[in-house]
Structure formats: C-alpha cells, structure tokens
Amino acid sequence: MSSCSDWLEVLPKNEQVTSDYWKSKEDVEAVLASGYYYMRTTIPYLIDWGELRGGSVYTPFVGARSKIQDFQLVANSSYCKWEAFYQVINMANSVINYAPTVLGVDETYKEASMKSHQTEAYFMRALTYFYLVRNFKEVPLVLTPYVDDSAPYVVAKSNENEILEQIKKDIETALDTDAAKESYDEVWANKGRATKWSLYALMADVCLWMEDYDGCITYANKLIEANASFRPVFISSPENWFTVFYPGNSNESIFELNWDYATYGQTSNSPSNYYQLQASSIYLYTTAMKERLVEETEEVLEGKNPVRSLYGAYVPSTDDYKTAELAYVWKYQGVGVDDVNAVRANKDANFIIYRMADVLLMKAEALIWKGADSWEAALKIINQIRVRANLPELAINLQEADELTMLKYVLNERDMELAAEGKRWYDLMRLGKSKNYKYKNEFIQMVIANNKTASQSWLRSVLKNEYAWYLPIFQDELEANELLKQNPYYDVTNQ
Amino acid sequence: MNIKLLKYIFVAVLLLTGLEAYAQRLVVSGKVTEDFGGMEEPITGVNVNVVNSQNRSVGGTITNLDGVYNLSIPVQDKNLTLVYSFIGMKTKRVKYTGQKQVNVKMESNVETLQEVAVVAKRIDRNDMGITQKEQVSATQKIKMDDLIASSPVSSVEEALQGKLGGVDIISGGGDPGARSSIHIRGTNSLNSSSEPLIVIDGVPYTTNIDEDFDFSTANNEDLGALLNIAPTDIESIEVLKDASATAIWGTKGANGVLMITTKKGSMGKTNFSFSSKFTAKFEPKSIPMLNGNEYVALMQEAIWNSANYIGMGSTNKYLKLLFDTPEIGYNKEWKYFDEYNQDTDWLSEVRQTALTWDNNFSMSGGGEKANYRLSLGYLSDGGTTIGTGLKRLNSSLNINYQFSKKLKFGADFSYSQTDKDANWANVRSEAFTKMPNKSPFWLDENGEKTNQYFSYQTRDFEGEFNGKENFNPVAMAEESKNNTMQREGKITFRMDYELLKGLSYKGWASMNMRTTKTRMFLPQVATGVVWTSKYANQSTDATSDQFSLQTENKLVFIKDWNRKHNLIANLLVRTSQTQKSSYSSSTSGNASSGLSDPIVGSSVESIGSGDSEVRSISSIGLLNYTLLERYVLQGSVNMEGNSAMGKSNRMGYFPGVGISWNVHNESFLKKHDWLDELKLRFSVGQSGNAPSGASIYLGAFSSLGEYMNMAAIRPVRMQLDNLKWETSTEYNYGLDLGFFRGKLKFTFEYYQKYVKDLLQKDVEVPSTTGYTSIKFFNSGELTNKGWEFRTDATLVDKKDWNVSAYVNLSRNTNEVTDMPDNIAQENYSFGNGNYAIRVEENRPLGSFYGYRYKGVYQNKEATYARDKEGNVMNDVQGKPIVMKNGSSTVYPGDAIYEDINHDGVVNEYDIVYLGNYMPILTGGAGLAVRWKDWSLNAFFHGRFGQKIINAARMSNEAMYKPDNQSRAVLRRWRNEGDLTDIPRALYNEGFNYLGSDRFVEDASYVRLKSVTLTYRIPKKIARNWGLNNMNVYVTGYDLLTWTEYTGQDPEVSIPSKASALAKDNANTPCSVRFCVGLNMNF
C-alpha cells in the first residue's frame, strides 16, 4: 500500500515543491528575505496611510488616492488593500513555524541562528500587525502559515486589544530568547534587517500607542542608555543630519528598508519613486506644512545653516523660498543639505521605519502624558533635537504650561523632524484617542488646519465618528471571507 | 484397401511430395462442393487442414478450380482430424481414420445466421466475463459493420451521433479534423472534463486535452485522438452509462465509457476487403451581407448619427472622421480610390467546394493456432475554407497466437499519421465583416485585378492587425500556414492463461507514443503590418511528445453449477502513467514568405516549454452472481489513487451494486413465446473525478527576487492536502422488453446522478492567507436526472422485403443544488455585447443573463422614463426624465431595454435570466428498407430546447464598428414610424446591442444526417468477378435541416468549460455532402 502511494508521488521537474522545501538554513533565510521583499511592497501604503490624512503631505491629483486625504475612501478602492501586509505576515509565520523543522535536517543550522531568524520574523509580524491595527482597528489575526491548506481560509476579525497584546507578546518572545542580533556581518544588514534594537523601538512605539507610558520609557531607555558597541546612536552634529537619508543606514538609524541600485539594481517601491522634485510629484508638502518649514528656516540661529528645513526636509519650487508656491520633499532625493542640484543618481533611497530621534521624541511624549513632574525631562529631549537642527531651545515656563500645550510642542517637533517619514497621522491619532478621546476636538482642529483639499465642514462631520479615522476593508476581502465584517463607518448595509 | 487405390496414392505421393513423403506419408484426396440452387457446385480455394489432437495443424492445402484437393497425411501422428473451412461456409470437421478419399459437401452459414447469432450472444462476454443476460446496468452495443454498411462515415463520432440514447454528440464544425464534443448523461463537473472514457480493445485511450491548454490561441493538440481509428477497423462500440457498468473502468469512466472493439483475424482463407469512397462537400448558403454601396451608405449614416449624438462642435471627432475617411468617401484623387470602390463578396473568395477521398484496405486470415489482421487506410479530407484540409494514414496489425489450449498471446501494433492544414487566423469571421467596397488585390491602370494582394489597412478606420482580426482574408487563406502533424504509434501485448478450470489470468501492457508538430507562418502580405511588428512574417514552431504506459493484470473466475448458480468474479489491478513534454517558439521578421522554421527569424517573440507526468493506479473487485438464470446480483468496489492528489486523500473508494430480474425466465412466462425478454434492472454506484493536471495538489516555492543580496523565495502556490475526489453517486432504473423473436424491442432507463465536492478551479481566497487564489477547492453539489428511451422494430421481414426502424430519445436535467463557496463568478460588466454567465442554486449550468429587448424608441415621448404604474417620471424641475442606457441618454431610434427596477437607467441591475444552452430533449431515429439487393437507410438527429447566443447575428447587426453587416440592417430605424426591431446605426456610441434576448435564439433542430442507397452486387456475379461480395452506394449527408434558428447552423458546439457561454460565432458550418463508394471482399 505504501509503495503504491510512493509510486503516485510524482514531483514536477520544473518547480521547487513544498515537501522538498525547509531542508536547509538557506531555505529559511530565503523566506525571511521574501518577508523583507514584501515589506518593500507595502511602502506606497505606508506613505498613503501614514501621511495623507495627517495633512503635512498631500497628493495634488484628484483621483482615487486623494480620497484618502479627503476622508472619502470607499470599500472598493484599491488604496485600502491589505494584501501586501498579509504577504509579509505569511512569510513571518512560515519562518516562525518551519525554521525549527530545519534544525534536525541541516546539521550546519545551529539553534542560535534558527532563533535569531525567528526574532526577525517576530519583528516583521509585530510591525506589520501594528500598521494594520492602527489603520483598520480590527483585522483577522493570522498566526499560522498558509503553506498548505490545513488552516481555514476564512478568519474573523480579532479586536484591537487582542492584536496589540499579540504584538507585545511577539516582541517579548523574541527578546526572551536573547537571540536577536545586535549586528550583522554585512553593514547594510545592521539597519536593513531586524535587530534587538528594532525590537526595542517597536515596543516603545506600541507601548506609547497603548498608553503604557512607563513601558514606552523603559524600552526607549534600552536604546538611549545602551552601551553595546554596535548600538544606534543619536547623531548630535547638525552637519551629519542628512547622512541619515544619504547615504542612509546611519548610526542614528534603527531599522530601515534598504534599496541599492548600484550593486543590486533595486529601486522598485523605494520612496524616491513617489516623492519627486516636481509639481506633478505624487506627494507634495501641504501649504500649512510649507509655512511651518519656511518659519523654521527663518528661525535658524544666526550664522548657522538650516538643517532639517530648507534643503533638508524640502526644496522650494522656485529659488526664493519665501515666495515659492510649492515645497518638494528632499529627504529621498538629495545627497546633502547644501546644494539643490546635488540629487541622488538613482531612485533607491531607503525608507526609515525607526531612528533614534523618533525614539527620543516617543520618550518625550510619554513623559508629557505621565504628568507635569516629568515635563522638564521631556523639554530637555525636545531641545536636544532642536539644538541639532540649529534652532534655539524652547523657553517654556513649565509652571504655566498645560498638558495640551506640551503635547503640541512634542507633536510639532515630531512633525518637523520626521516630516514625510510616514509618521504624522499616527501622531495625530494618539493625540485624538488617548485618555479616552480627551483631545478629540483639538485633533479634529489640527486635521482641518492642515488639510488642503477637503472642506472644513465635511472633515468636522466625518471625524466625529471615530471609526472614520480607520480605513474600510477592501470589498473583495469581504466577498472572499464571509466571516469578515466591514468597519461600521463604511458598512453601507447598516445605514 | 484395394490395389487401385494404392496405385493412386503412390502416384499422388510421387507427384506431389516427392521423395520426402516416400516412407512417411499417406495421402487423402477428394472433392469439395456446395449446394448452389439445387446443383452441386465445386468450391475453389477451400482450406483443407489436417490437425492433431492438440488442434495443431500438421499439414494443409486448398482445393483447385474443380474443388479437388490432395492432402498428405503424416503417418506418425495419431488422432487426426480433417478440417474444411471457407469463408461464408460452416467449417466442417471429419475424423481421419485412414480414409483415402473424403468428399465433402459444405453448407453456407447464411441460413443459420440467426442461430449463430443466438449462440454468439450467449458467449459474447465483455471484458469482465459478463454476458448480456447477466448484465445489471445500462449498456448499449452497436455493431459497426451494420453502421458502415448503411451509412459510410469518416469518424467514430459521426457514426454514433443520434444513435445512442443518452449520448449527446455535437460536431465541432465543418473544418476537417474538427473535434466533436461527447457528453454522456449531461455535464457532471464545473471544471473537470465531462468527456467519456474511450476504451479500445480493453485499453483505455486518453483523448483528454491538457488542463492548461489554451483553446483560444492554438489548435496544436486539437486533433481528436479518436479520429485516428478508421471506422472500418471497428467491430463494435458499446456504451456504458451508469456507475455500476463503468465501475470496472475506474474513475476515468465516471462520465461514461465508449468501448470500442476492433476487428480481429479469423481462421480460414485469407480474406481481403477494400472500400473506397469519394465525397464532395457543398457549403450551405451563407448569411446575405451588404454590398459595397449599401455598406458605404450605412457607415456614413452611422458616423453622421454619432456626430449628432455627441453634439455638433468644432472638435466633433465624428465629423472629422466623416471628412477624413476616404475609404468610405468618394474622393477620386485618393491613390487607393479604385481599391476602395469595389464590390467584393469576401466570403466566396475564401470558400471552395471540397473533395474527400477515403480508402481502406484490410487483410485477415489465419489457422487454428494463429490469426492476424492487417489494415491500411488513407483519407484525404478537403476543407471548404481555402487552406484547410486533412490527410490521414493509418495502419494496424493484430496478431494472436495460441500456444496451447491454456495459453494465448496477442499483440496489436498501430501507427497513424494525421496531417492537418488550417488558416493562421479565422478567415471566415474576417471575411464576414470585411468592408465589401475594398478589393482583395491591387488593381492595375485599367481597373483589372492583379495578382498582388492589397494588404493596406488604414489605422484610423479599419484598424491594425491585432493577432485576431483586421487582415486580408484572401491572402490569409492562400498564404498563411498552420500545419499540424500528429504521429501516433501504439503497441499492446496481451496474455491469457487458464490457471484452473474456470479461473484464468489475463494481462496486457500497452504503450502509446504521440508526437505532434505544429508549424505556423503568418505572412506580412496578409496583415500589412510594419516590419517592426511582432506579427510581421511571424513563424511558430511547436512540438509536443506524449508517452503513456498502461498495464492491467486480471484474474477472472467463471463457474456455473447446473445452470442454478452462476458466479463470475474479477479481480484486477490497472496502472497508468503518462508523460508529456512540449516546446514552442515563435519569431518575427523572417526574411521570406513561407519560412516557418523560427531559427531564421530576426527576433524571438515567445518561447515556452512544459513537462509533466501523471500516474494513477486502481484495484477493482467485482462479483456477479446469477440464481436460476433469473436473479442477478452484482457488487463491485474500486480503490483508486491518482498522483494529482495528496497522500491523505489520494485513495478513493467507490462501491457499486446492482440487481436485475430476468422475468421472462420465470416459469409462469416461459410458455409465452411472443415474449423474448422482460428484464428489470436497478443499480447504484459511486465514482470519482480527480482534478486534472500533474501533481496539482503540490505547493511550490519559487523565486521572488532579492532583498539586497538575500535571495527571496516564497511559497507561490499553496499545498492542497485537503483536495479530494469529486464524487458522484448514480442510481439507474432500467427496463428491457423484447417481443416476437427480436422484432420489437424497448429499453427504458431512468437515472439520478448526484455529484458532490465539486472541483472549483482557481478559487479566490482571502488575502489574509498571503495568496489571492488557490488552484482547486472542493465545494458545491449538482445533480443530473433524466431518462432514455429506445425502441427498435422490424416492421416487415419477408424474403425480399425488410423494413426496420429505431427511435431513441433522451432527456437530461441539470441543476446546481448547492452553491460552491468562493465561486468566482464570471465578471459581468455593463457593455455592448456582454452577457452574464452565473452558476446559481437551483438553476442548470450554462444559464446566462441579460436584458429584455423591447424594440426601438419611436419618438421623444417614448424615451421618457416611466415608473411601475407607467407614469412619466419627472426630475426636480418638473421636466420628464429621459431614459438612459448606461451612461448614454437615449434618442429616438435607440434600443429599448426593459427597465426592470424602474430607475430610469438600464444598467447591470436590470439583467434577467435569459436561457440555458442545455437541450431539453435529444434524440435520433433511423429507418432501413431492404428490397432484394437494394437497401435504403436514413438517419435523423435532433436536439430541442437549447438556447444559443447568436453572436454572429449580433456582430452582423450591431452597426457599431466599421465591420460589414448583414442585409437585415437595411430595415434599420431611420425615421419615426419605421416599424422595425433594428435600432438606428450609431458608430462607436450608445448601447444599441447590449447582451439581450434579441440575440438569444432557440436552436432546436431536426436534421437528416444521412441517407444512403446501397446496391449489393448479386453473389453469382460477384463470384464471377472473383469476389465474395461487393456493394456500391451513394450517400447524402446533412441534406435537410428543420429549424427556426436564423444562424448558419443550429448545431452550435457547447463550450468546453461548463461556465462559459454557448455562442454561435459562425464557424465553418457543416457542409452538405454527397458521396459515392464501394465495399468489396475477396
């Protein structure tokens, strides 16, 4: 009987079949690489979802994409597809589940490197779910790989808290094994692949989102106070600020998705393709943001150069920056802060997910939320960032300040420092939702103030419904999965 | 023993055998005669053999012209028997006891035919050893000789159409080698093949087309493999329909089985037969099209209407088109003025009257130990479209050898070669729509046609060649090349060994090798494309190889206990493996017309290869028990595995049971001799359907690219371990009645077939899985229910007169009873010509949806939208709302569609069920009349109730594109008051030919498939010519068709995929054919 079954086992000659896979450590690495590869394909979504609703960056074309910034997205828009994210998750799930099976097969595969691969996969999965939960609130929580059809295809949504707890659990599991690498043999991989440091940064971000401010500070400090030789370090010198973007993989960086045209011929999905130096670029800074950038340019200390404004974050559409109509995003195109003509040879800029300035400001925000006692420490961090930007320190009378003012300081600092890095909308959402929607009105005001394309009354009425802060689930998904329920704001059948 | 005789013998021995026989041999002589009209006539050429106790020939001779023979007898052998055999005569055996002279009078076996037939029937066991009497299931057998004699055919499908109950055969059109579709008892699967299994001499024959075969692009493998058997080599065809009958063939027989038995050699004198026929094909009248002037007038009107429609303005593109299109203008200055002011009937330019020549020769013979049959055939089949045709050569040799009474060997060899020519693109549909004012050739100064093709295609109006349309059909028919050469060799070895009395072993191994080579060439002169185009002088070369090896080992036990108990048991294991590989490439820019070898092309356009292997194994056990010749009980179980599925679900178990009751053998009925047969049957059985494709369940990993220097590999296909068999359960109830010694017979069958775990292909899955679709998924249920009825009657049976007839009718109802989950419905988008096809619960497969057509809007008032009560709807300003077809506001002259939801807009929410392509009833009838040596046979075939989308009429009446239209558009709407069902001409605007019931037609028909008149040359004359028998005939095919259908041919082929639309695209229609031929035996 078994010999008969063996005879019926016919393997194709032109394909690598599943049963022959998972035989060596290279197999594990290759699937992990696919995870990173798919993460690159999420870049357009990370920019759309992280920036357009925040109003610092907008898309000048009226069309399907501009519906995001106008809060008019409907379920059949391809801009709310989550397919690319679940492809990352499937790769991560595959590595987490199948890497241990390789241990016994490939003798050169050591447990330590297997666990290290798993930590990368945990990071991938946690980060991807973190993006999903911030954009959809509730999504199906898939933790098993679909290499075969043993798991059911249709999965219902999990609630927000469950997903967030799973994210924390993944990071903790990864950290508990102590197998996460601090550095790799190859230089690009120190920033281009997940490390212990990227796990800390992600955890700090997750804690901040979950309003666990002590947790946020604890994990931020693991980075800030680290003394390992290959740790990420806040670059304090203003002259080196642009090295964060060019050539990239700077000391300050914690995790960034890498591209390299010169060596590997890779440019596809790099942010350079989307932020262009022309009026017809897919993304431009909004008028409000342009004004802030001009303002900061003028605020720069006497005798010093602007660092993160003119020729740092942006270039004006005409030579005179004060009268220029448009502001182009410079971070992903330039090679330095000095010369507008010094443009990257190839469209292969990296996309930074976490860097030290971000983590420092996360800590500052957590300190502010914690209460007035820790505001001084927060202000110190903000000023540390400002000094690097050749800006005067903020002089604030902390006795007269209130929580909202302080939050606005840190949000503004994040807006300027992390402009066009896909962070703005989540920063605003934290303001709007934290402490049981305490600053919901201020949040709505800030969205309206920045938005360039939608009418105020429309925005005000839409944003009153908190579910409208999230995206609709793509129509095809609802059709293929009968257990899925649409985000209530977009559920037409319920109205 | 007297001296005289001794002398005779002595002289004879000296004369005949010389010294060798001197001491060892005796001689027997004599004369062989037959009774011929009361006279004793000598027979020439009778085989006289002397055989020993093992029935082995130890010597032989034949009679001379006077019927006299002399045969030497080896003296050392004992127990000798003299055997006299002659074709058409009863073989006679005489015990040799030392006689010197044996005179024999042979009897013709003609008068005992009836008796022989009865005897033959009793021992006529099928592959399982089961006789007709012990049968519990629905089968029907056809003797091919009867068919061939009465209606000469060139393919098996043609022979069977309309003659078998429950077997629906639709011819694939009039092109040579077009493949027919065969469905037994309806469509049983959404995505798997519904074609029946064909078994040739016990060996399953794979005709299946590849899973991934793309029908739209190529005809590379479209040669019906079945075609490679000449009908004259076939002895009989049996159709097995229900699950208990097909059980022995495993799951491959789930859609029914056609069992073909080929002719074998027989003992006796070598028998030669030769048949030849000559056929002329005439195409039926085609749809009348507009001539050059009518066409130009139509186009100008259509463009002018569109110019008005979008509103007059300086940038009106239609006004510009109207002025700048000299093709339909009258601008004598234009350099192509003459070429565009002709009146060309394009279709007649690419048609021809075709001739077909079919010859078959066979030779058979043998002795007691061995026999053989050799056959050769050559067919040259011309096509009615220029450039099409088919040539087929086939040969086969069958040898059987009997070592002893227990051990037998056999071998079959066959080789066939089919050479098919077709056009590169569909020249007919192009010729239909080609502008009739254009000339196929350049014209010289005098306006006379030259021999240079006019291949100029204006880009703005006519459009460029796109791989399918916009070319010069005459040049395409004459110059393009699309040749497919298929060579197939088949070898089967068999062995039979009787282990014990009643228990025997039978085994065979069969190899089949098939090579298909396709060469295509698309000449630039036909397309007029620029030299940089990928279509410029494009050459394609493709080959595919298939090798399949099948084996079967079987134990058969047959025992009868005093006719009280009868037991038949079978146990068999059958394996099958098929390997396929293919390769194709095409290049463009070949230097010269006619170069079809891609190696010389300047640039490679495409290149591809494939490689696959499929294996299956099945073990089948079957028991058949008969009590008192009355009560039959049969049980079987099939255990089958297929490499398409994963380990866990690979093995399928399919049981079947059946009972039958031979009521006529009951004592209370035995005395009624008018009743031959009264038999009740019931059977139930399961069968399975494996997903098609090689190792389809396997997941695969493939490269995605790189992340920096890390190679990225990801699972590209999910491994489908849960994939299982599509299982059907079939119940069959049957009744056989026979009266008056076979003169009147009835058969009635009723069946129900329930199919579950339907195989869904390319199913969309939630992207949370990380994939968008999976290859196969089991879900959904459907049923097929129906009945079949057949009656055969001999109306007159006299010495000189014989009239017999048959009628068969079948009805099959298909219904989807459980909707498959995740079914990917064919996307429907609102637009001209589109129909929706949906799989819906409680509806049959093949249902399609569209709009209800209500005629033409006559005036402004008619265009106002109306609510349910029929009141005009007004907008907020109080003005009446005007109907819209989609986004287009309608005007008088536009098409009216029913606004089902009364919202003033005809859009996708207004589509309704329009029909289904499954026929309600199919049937056939035949009539045979014999008077002395003359006989007349007629066959009818009919299908009723199927709805077909007449896509040809749609494109011939759309008036939307620069295509030529049929003469029906001459009654198009022009002014208010024009009472017509055809809307106004509107070039490239509006929605005047949405997929609606306007183009859905009932394609019911009855067709006189063939009528044949045969004359048998009287035996006496034939014998004078040295022949055993000979007949000549004339046949007419497809002479008459009764139908309401307006297309060319109501016999529209059913799509190969159950969820596709049945459209009549005006492919080559079946021609009216006349044929003369002769058959002879000598």
Image: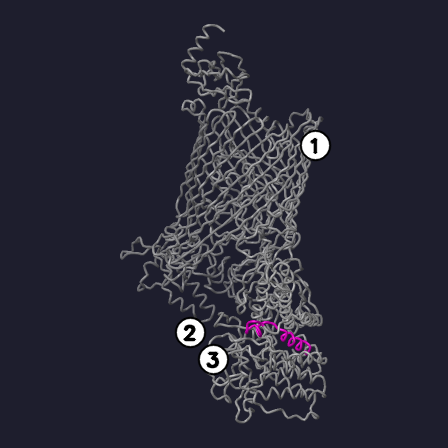
Q: Residues within 10 Å of mark 2 (few under 14, many from 20)?
A: few
* Whether marks 3 and 2 lie on the same chain: no
Of residues B360 and B204, which is closer to you in this image?
A: B204
Q: Which three-letter amino acid code belongs to the residue tagged 2?
A: Ser
Residue A112 versus residue A71: which sits nearer the camera?
A112
How far across and down, in percent of the image, does residue B885 sit? 54, 65
Residue B899 falls in image quadrant = bottom right
Provide the residue designation for mark 2: B314
Assess whether residue A195 is covered by the magenta stretch: yes
10 Å crowding of disc 1: few (<14), some (14-19), many (20+):
some
- Mark 1, residue position: B631
Instruction: For residue B345, say whether it is visible.
Output: no
Answer with left or right where residue B53 lies relative to residue B1030: right
Can marks 3 and 1 be said to lie on one chain?
A: no
Identify the main secondary structure in magenta.
helix
Residue ranking furthest to the left? B445
- Residue B810, compared with residue A209, is above or below; it is above
**Dot in front, 2 or 1:** 1
Q: Amino acid at mark 1?
A: Tyr
Q: Secondary structure at mark 1?
A: strand
Residue A469 at x, y percent in the picture: 65, 76
Closer to viewer: mark 3 or mark 2: 3
Q: Which residue is mark 3?
A: A343
Type of the residue with mark 3: Val
Q: Which stretch did the figure color magenta?
A: A184-208
